[in-house]
Amino acid sequence: MPFTRYAEVGRIVLVNYGPESGKIATIVDIVDQNKCLIDGPESGVARQVIPFSRIALTDLTVKIQRNARAKTLKAAWAEAETTTKWEATSWAKKLSMKKKRATLTDFDRFKVMVAKKQKSAIIAKKMEELSA
């Protein structure tokens, strides 16, 4: 399968470092081979120049012109339903689960452990019945 995630104007990216970490934005312009201009109208990412090493390219794109205004970009995001498409990806689901696990209390972790034990006991019992 050929490579398809190119750094291009309109590519949706995930910021993976800094204060905007975990938010999605759009590449609005390519500054040079190491940096690009991004903007995230619905995710709260301010328009800024960011190195490629601090972002991860996604499979999503929006149709915009180079250096599009914030209003144009917001309309393109709404037209392409970018936020809903992103939330439907397995990548976004993994990130939300990771964030949810990080906020668990000690008692919540205990409840998860007990639930896993109960689940494995039920599965083991069913497997024993099937093999017998």
Image: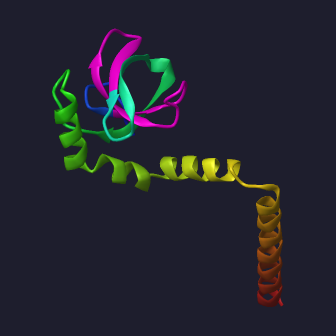
Foreground pick, 58 / 25: 25
Q: Position of residue 16 (x, y in %)?
A: 53, 30
Name the side, left or right, on which 119 lies relative to 65. right
Q: Quadrant of the N terminus?
A: top left
Q: Residue at x 56, y 50 (%)?
A: 96
Q: Report the residue that reaches farthest toward the top.
A: 32
Q: Residue at x 35, y 48 (%)?
A: 83
Q: Quadrant of the C terminus?
A: bottom right
120 above or below 130? above
Q: Position of residue 74 (x, y in %)?
A: 23, 39
Q: Position of residue 57 (x, y in %)?
A: 41, 32
Q: Residue at x 36, y 19 (%)?
A: 48
Foreground pick, 20 / 129: 20
Magenta span of residues: 12-38
Name the side, left or right, on which 57 lies relative to 71. right
Membership of 67 in magenta stretch: no
Foreground pick, 50 / 57: 50
Q: Is residue 8 visible?
A: yes
